[in-house]
Image (spheres, rainbow, N blue to C red):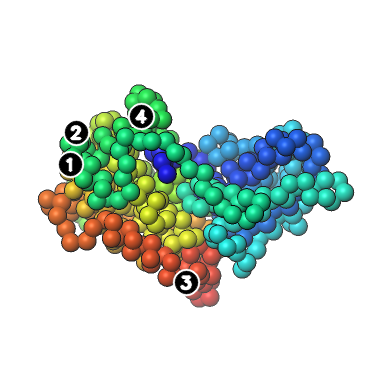
Amino acid sequence: MAISLFDLFKVGIGPSSSHTVGPMVAANQFAHQLKEHQLISKVHRLKIDLYGSLGATGKGHGTGTAVLMGLEGELPDLIDPSGVNERVERIESSSQLNLLAQHPITINVATDLIYHRIDRLDFHANGMVLVAFDEDGKTLHQATFYSVGGGFIVQEDEQGNVALVEDTTELPHVFHSAEALIKLCRSEDKSIAQIMLENERHWRTEEEIKQGILSIWSVMKSCVQHGIRNEGILPGGLKVKRRAASLHRDLTSKTRMDMITPSLGAMDWVNLYALAVNEENAAGGRVVTAPTNGAAGIIPAVLHYYWEFCPRSCEEGVIDFFLTAAAIGLLFKENASISGAEVGCQGEVGSACAMAAAGLAAATGGSPEQIENAAEIGMEHNLGLTCDPIGGLVQVPCIERNAMASIKAINSASMALRGDGTHYVSLDKVIRTMRDTGRDMNDKYKETSRGGLAVNVIEC
């Protein structure tokens, strides 16, 4: 299956790629299916059932809101986040939704949008069933979707089978493991970024690829700037105070000499970048899925570190960073998972940490072997990481966890660059270990808010 860099890095809104971005896309597809089947004018009422992790933490993750907006015709990369709450309030108060912005239908959010907190569907932990009824209550159309992580969705067919719609593009450089990727780099005498760029050219021109990457980088920078300007309390009821703005004021009031001791200097800024992005994500702002929203702050934070603190940083380095990080992300997507509901937070924060470490190593001149080592270190030290968001909100421990993983990614790249690329544990073995650990992990630790901090903090 061919996956593009631009499939992994998608512009959307918070707080979750699997619980917000994916369900919005699925609901949008369902609405367009009604239109394609010429049923939209006959729809009188809709019913949406959310299962598994979507049912358990969907309220805190904004799943219901995302579904409603998708049904009205919105998509994550185009929707204006500032008007979402007002539109949802209108739908709830009027019990009326404007299907694809052209056909008003009845919907009682309290009874027609159902969160099944315990039940789950067989294929994946993030399942949702949408049903459209006519005025007599007869079913017009029904569809089952799964949000499988990172904003990717799949649909179940009428026989109950789930078939991935694969991109069958024949790429010039095919690799399904880190070992194969390294061998390609050696045989072709090319960097990982060059291998990825030549693959990407089968979808876009080189200029389009580079401009697309720089556009994503621009959205990331904008997200950081929004994060350091906005203050107040994050939504959801935990009353978590936004910290990025005050931290930014503190850092900008100091000189570089002030920051030598006892502060960590550049690391304080890395913390700021990560906090800023993930506070924006928690507030439902515009972010880049990288490779998920729950881990959206790590790659921007490490990229900002490269841009602001690494000598000779440049746009070509940024492009190499993204291309290399995408190559590592593809390996996680294909051989394990990037879904917290499937393998825990090791699949989200762990994957992003490995991708960021690899990207930084590439941007600062690392060899393919050193890059693979950086990614391996980044993932190895996130193995077993659970996903236990308090109150089902992408806030605690998610926001700080992004900052911690950003520091870890920088250190991983630094350690790898100090070596010659040889190491005991391969990235492929770590990816398999992450997959197996996720399968063995109790479901209560996989984005259900039924275990770990989510339970103990509330109980205390």
Disc 3 crowd rating (10 Å Cα; few below 14, some 14-19, many 20+) is few
Q: Residue at x 55, y 59 (%)?
A: 123
In this rendering, the label closer to the viewer, 3 or 4: 4
Looking at marks 2 and 3 on the same chain, the residue that comes earlier in the sequence is marked by 2
User: As drawn, is 153 to the left or to the right of 316?
Assistant: right
Q: Position of residue 333 (x, y in %)?
A: 40, 51
Q: Which residue lies at the image location 35% right of the left edge and 42% below the top edge?
A: 326
Residue at image coords 53%, 36%: 77
Please state which amino acid type lies under the numbered disc 4.
Arg
Task: Say which mark, if any, is on residue 201.
Answer: 4
Determine whether label 3 and label 1 are within 8 Å by CB: no
Q: Residues within 10 Å of mark 4 (few under 14, many from 20)?
A: some
Q: Earlier in the sequence, mark 3 or mark 4?
A: 4
Q: CA distance from mark 3 to mark 1?
A: 41 Å
Q: CA distance from mark 1 to mark 2?
A: 26 Å
Frontmost of labels 3 and 1 is 1
Label 4 element class: loop
N-terminal of the pair, mark 1 or mark 2, is 1
Between residue 274 and residue 173, name the one nearer to us.
Answer: 173
Q: Is residue 217 visible?
A: no
The image quadrant of residue 439 is bottom left
Query: Which is in the foreground here, disc 1 or disc 2?
Result: 1
Disc 1 to disc 4, how far (Cα)? 21 Å
The residue that label 3 is drawn on is 442
- Residue under label 1, please give it: 186
Q: Which mark is residue 312?
A: 2
Give the mark nearer the N terminus: 1 vs 4.
1
Give the quadrant of residue 35: top right
Identify the mark nearer the N-term, 2 or 4: 4
